[in-house]
Image (cartoon, coloured by chain):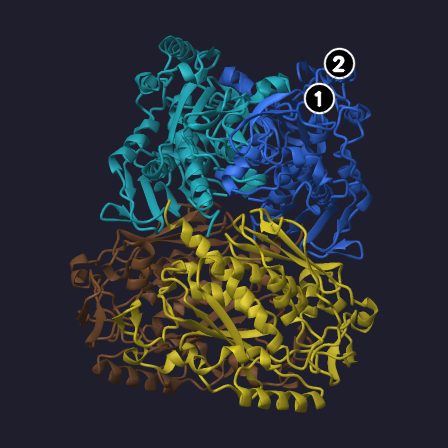
Chain colours: A yellow, B brown, C cyan, D blue
Amino acid sequence: MNSLGSLFKVSSLGESHGDVVGCVIEGCPAGFSLDFDKIQLQVNRRKTGKQSFSSARQEDDQIEIVSGVFEGKTLGSPICILIKNKDSKPTDYDHLKDVYRPGHADYSTQQKYGFRDYRGGGRSSIRITAPMVAAGEIALQLIQHYYQVSIIAYVSQIGSVRCETDYNHLNFSQIDNSIVRCPDEDTSNRMIELIDQVQQEGDTLGGKISCVIQQLPVGIGEPIFGKLQAQLAHAMMSINTAKGFEYGDGFASASMKGSESNDLFHKTTKGIETSSNHCGGILGGISNGMVIYFNIAFKPISSIQQEQTTLNTNQDEVKLKIKGRHDVCAVPRAVPIVEAYTAIVLADLLLQSKTNQL
Amino acid sequence: MNSLGSLFKVSSLGESHGDVVGCVIEGCPAGFSLDFDKIQLQVNRRKTGKQSFSSARQEDDQIEIVSGVFEGKTLGSPICILIKNKDSKPTDYDHLKDVYRPGHADYSTQQKYGFRDYRGGGRSSIRITAPMVAAGEIALQLIQHYYQVSIIAYVSQIGSVRCETDYNHLNFSQIDNSIVRCPDEDTSNRMIELIDQVQQEGDTLGGKISCVIQQLPVGIGEPIFGKLQAQLAHAMMSINTAKGFEYGDGFASASMKGSESNDLFHKTTKGIETSSNHCGGILGGISNGMVIYFNIAFKPISSIQQEQTTLNTNQDEVKLKIKGRHDVCAVPRAVPIVEAYTAIVLADLLLQSKTNQL
Amino acid sequence: MNSLGSLFKVSSLGESHGDVVGCVIEGCPAGFSLDFDKIQLQVNRRKTGKQSFSSARQEDDQIEIVSGVFEGKTLGSPICILIKNKDSKPTDYDHLKDVYRPGHADYSTQQKYGFRDYRGGGRSSIRITAPMVAAGEIALQLIQHYYQVSIIAYVSQIGSVRCETDYNHLNFSQIDNSIVRCPDEDTSNRMIELIDQVQQEGDTLGGKISCVIQQLPVGIGEPIFGKLQAQLAHAMMSINTAKGFEYGDGFASASMKGSESNDLFHKTTKGIETSSNHCGGILGGISNGMVIYFNIAFKPISSIQQEQTTLNTNQDEVKLKIKGRHDVCAVPRAVPIVEAYTAIVLADLLLQSKTNQL
Amino acid sequence: MNSLGSLFKVSSLGESHGDVVGCVIEGCPAGFSLDFDKIQLQVNRRKTGKQSFSSARQEDDQIEIVSGVFEGKTLGSPICILIKNKDSKPTDYDHLKDVYRPGHADYSTQQKYGFRDYRGGGRSSIRITAPMVAAGEIALQLIQHYYQVSIIAYVSQIGSVRCETDYNHLNFSQIDNSIVRCPDEDTSNRMIELIDQVQQEGDTLGGKISCVIQQLPVGIGEPIFGKLQAQLAHAMMSINTAKGFEYGDGFASASMKGSESNDLFHKTTKGIETSSNHCGGILGGISNGMVIYFNIAFKPISSIQQEQTTLNTNQDEVKLKIKGRHDVCAVPRAVPIVEAYTAIVLADLLLQSKTNQL
């Protein structure tokens, strides 16, 4: 329940304000050199505090790899990645100790376990994804050592502002030039404007991330319950605040006819391709060699700066005003998470495909 | 990869035109009496051939439970459910033997395995869900033996025709009175009309199914990668032709503000509830006691009756015209599949919650 | 809990006197031709009724492969193997319905589940291994398609009669020429003599099986909890009536000194070898290229023909005399089970070793 | 492959001379108070350096619990336990860098991965069991919070010196009064004498550990491949240098008759018991309420102080003399490991038994 993947498996550990957040990678092949700077860089992309609209928590998110690596290379044994929680001031959370924050996991967690770490959401905090991003980057480096696969995610919607341009016509190199990680400059500007305005209101915003996988070999994914889209959906819906997943034409498929939705096979110099790509690069749960693309919808984050009515653990009605600066929109920071989880799913399925033959 | 669930685990087996399709349930508690008629009834709901717009294949889909049950009661040992393939005429498929049908898994499967059962899609056929529906009904009977939980799915869209009425205002008892399984009579009629028209064109339709879980206890679902919504998404995206999943406000959440999206806790005579239910009954991956609801989008089925250009296994371009009567719209038949997979996920997570204490 | 193996996984199903006993193989690579006659032959080696000292139950143990195979070749999908229970006369067991047979699982099963199939031990019967033997033969055919590995088991002890000759000096081709499956003729004769004598007494016998794996490549087995010996021990201790497992010098190692027990590496024309093989071909849980050998001890079977005092389900003391002819010594029939389980463990670990590289 | 247990699952991580050795416990119920002193005490029992005959490495083995615990109580989230490697002087191992030590995993590991951590055996070192002992103590505290179960292990053989007294007649409180952890004073003295003598020779010794589980409830263990004895065998055979496992009468059963081996049920004031306990408290893989007992044989440790001939990684013959003081006999230090692994297996199966009912 704490793990993503099966053969390339990453298991999460830690609480938001405990000693560490971390994860353990099992099944990473041995003798493979890691680029540690790139791992740290990707983790930094997820950090809070860079944008004016994000949480005030200051963490350096310095990763430590305490096992599974020797002389810069993987050993084939479990790779444990830890990030110390340094800027965790538990007293900041004393006013939330006995309160069920609306939209958060406080109430359902308390009911499930009868006991919880109330500091910053404990185990339910988005902070636990930080070491997972490091694991995802290791997965990506592993994949790219053997294949040309690329994985690119970007923000395609914030609140009511949508990026109407197709992934085919976007310049991915512009993604990180935008503080909201939308590669379309005009849309990006309108997103930032909206965020500024909503921040004034003490309110928050959700949005949508689009992800594109290029050059994945044909034949990746397993039938029935191991389908590539099912594993991606599972991974993406595991991200805090994710509310929806679709791939290929997604929800729009429901309104289409078969003659519009079918992609016809034809032969090109590169081999067998389809003339359109409504299916999003997956047929019967297995990659068909075309580009894979999918969207994830995120609800606005729940810690708004407005006063809300809620209950405390004694079931008394209380007025809640969450202290401190919090994210207005966490969607841009979720971009490296989407990429990381995608990389883990692909590393896992690529390893799985090695067992198709003895 | 063939299994749904972990503690209550259902593993699929069989090919569309092999001897049998079947499944094995592991982890079903012992000493529990099964209602065999209700199991068969639910399997029948999935069958083809009842509606004029569905496939011509005539199967009685008679289930046989060959293990795990003694004197009408579960033994705690694996329950093997088999359905014989009777109306499988392999020669019907000879013209498809060497052809990659557009929108189907033929090409990706061939590339993956280098060998495939070309008859009726083999392992990729929707037919393999038939015994899974029986397993789902067993899961439901198990759940309902101990809890008041109900699981109801219905068709909320076919092609461009949408049911605009909310689940709160629909009369679920009308679902099976509609051959398209839409409880809103007017919408149902317009759906049937659309199907008739598209059938004339030799084309096919997709749609959307909505599912509602009522009275699930608080505290069901596991954090991080065992989230209730992530497991539902995985299960639903495993259904053939599913293209999208959303729960609660889903994709609409992306455009909302936190103040609109948060559900406020308050106290009622029934205990703690939320005044609205934008979150869809799940917080932090764990049920909060409110109604859980989600949607699944399905693409139109790929076997259209129009001529299509495609490739054969020699990579020659060929004209393909699929023979025999095929489904125009398979969405209504997917309703019991959605219910079954939901029941399996819930049985699994309810069992999981038993291990929260020793 | 019903499965052996992880990537090559065999899941058991069925009860002794239910409709079928069976199993499902998952993870068998596709496109691999099966020799069905050899599978049936190996299953027949496990059958009762051939020897005068074995159970009177007459089953033809005809296997049916109902999924996962097409045109004689594996599809990569689950292979379901069924054996119908034909000679099951439930009324034969009416006198055992309410009695806890000494040495059997009746009491512990009843306490665990509160409900059980009392006919012939139900799920706890050795009969459930019959389809597992077929699965093991498939595993062996798969392994031998790619590697020169051989797996040979034989009876090395029955009651007080031990085979003192080392595996190196036995002629394995003689194993099945002995009805007790001991390749040493003199020992075999003394074993048969002992069985005849004990049969007169209405008593039963246990024994020991030795198993030898030759030409397994170096590097098979996983560290820590995936050790080759740990997986073999798990598999062997899963066989009904097994009481002990040892490999290499086994229990004798406890009395040795390091200088006696260490095997020294040296170079031969075949590569790196050890001059002795006290370790039994495994170092650190990983094969070292030398012969692997291990022993399994079995207790005498519990269904003796003498009157015994026991309790019924009302906790009343009763006299029990088991009806019908039963096995005097089941150890010879366990030989193909040991080979099958070994083959499954090896197929699984060989597949696992494919994931050491991407 | 790095994990023991399924519902109560402990995953090992770390290398002997890396930054840490550690483990992660998943599935431990929430809200349970830990006795940290007892955990550290049990870890200390496994430490080297206390006895004159053990390795010179000085580690304080101070455990750190960095996640899963809040205010002294378990959270239900993964419990990560780390022990820093402080006295690891990698240069001590430079002379072993390119040598395959006889009896060690160097050669098989190198062949498997093509790359290894040569320092102190890396991942194959017994040192990785240190945090597992902490996990085992947590498992034990959990079990004993709910049940009266006790788990006691002791040394019953070192080299040729055997403890002939039955577990029924030993005073377990004397175990830790003996530096070789044999509760029989006379045997203990003879063991120490033998160790002194063998230490002079620069040689090493193996031995046997016996383990006794008292008051485990009836009905624990799962049929077929989840048998209690199979899971214990798997766990015990995972301990470095273990060569054999037997339970109940074990290998002696092979020579017995059914009438000698069967344990007869009878009624006592405590409920249903058996008059003898040849079966070792397990019938059909499921506990029957009687005492469970088993033995594990260990080979002598391989790092002898005598010169040995071996090969280096260039396949040249070299003379090897291992430097530094090493253990003469590691069996006494394995006692807490046996107890820990037993506790983990039982915690796992006790949790499993909670899922027998919904």
Q: Residue at x 71, y 47 (%)?
A: D20
Q: What chain is tagged by disc 2?
A: D
> Between tags 1 and 2, which lies in front?
2
Q: Label 1, on which residue?
A: D168
What is the x, y in percent for residue C201? 44, 11
Q: Do circles 1 and 2 both sit on a common chain?
A: yes
Cα–Cα span, label 1 and label 2: 21 Å
What is the x, y in percent for residue D262? 54, 21
**Residue type at tag 1:** Asn
Q: Does B220 sit above or below residue D338?
A: below
Q: Is residue D194 visible?
A: yes
Q: Which of A179 and D163 lies nearest the eye of the viewer?
A: A179
**Residue type at tag 2:** Arg
When asked about the image quadrant of residue D154, the answer is: top right
Picture quarter with the N terminus of chain A: bottom right
Q: Which of A156 and C232 lies nearest the eye of the viewer?
A: A156
What is the x, y in percent for residue A229? 44, 66
Determine whether, in the image, residue B283 is placed left or right of residue B346: right
Q: Which mark is residue D190?
A: 2
What is the x, y in percent for residue C107? 54, 33
Determine whether, in the image, residue C268 is placed left or right of residue C80: right
Determine whether, in the image, residue A205 is placed left or right of residue B307: right
Q: Secondary structure at mark 1?
A: helix
When asked about the image quadrant of residue D58, the answer is: top right
Q: Secondary structure at mark 2?
A: helix
Q: Residue at x 32, y 54 (%)?
A: B113
- Please count the marks in the image: 2
**Residues packed near mark 1 inside 10 Å, few (<14), some (14 to 19) or many (20 plus):** few
Q: What chain is tagged by disc 1?
A: D
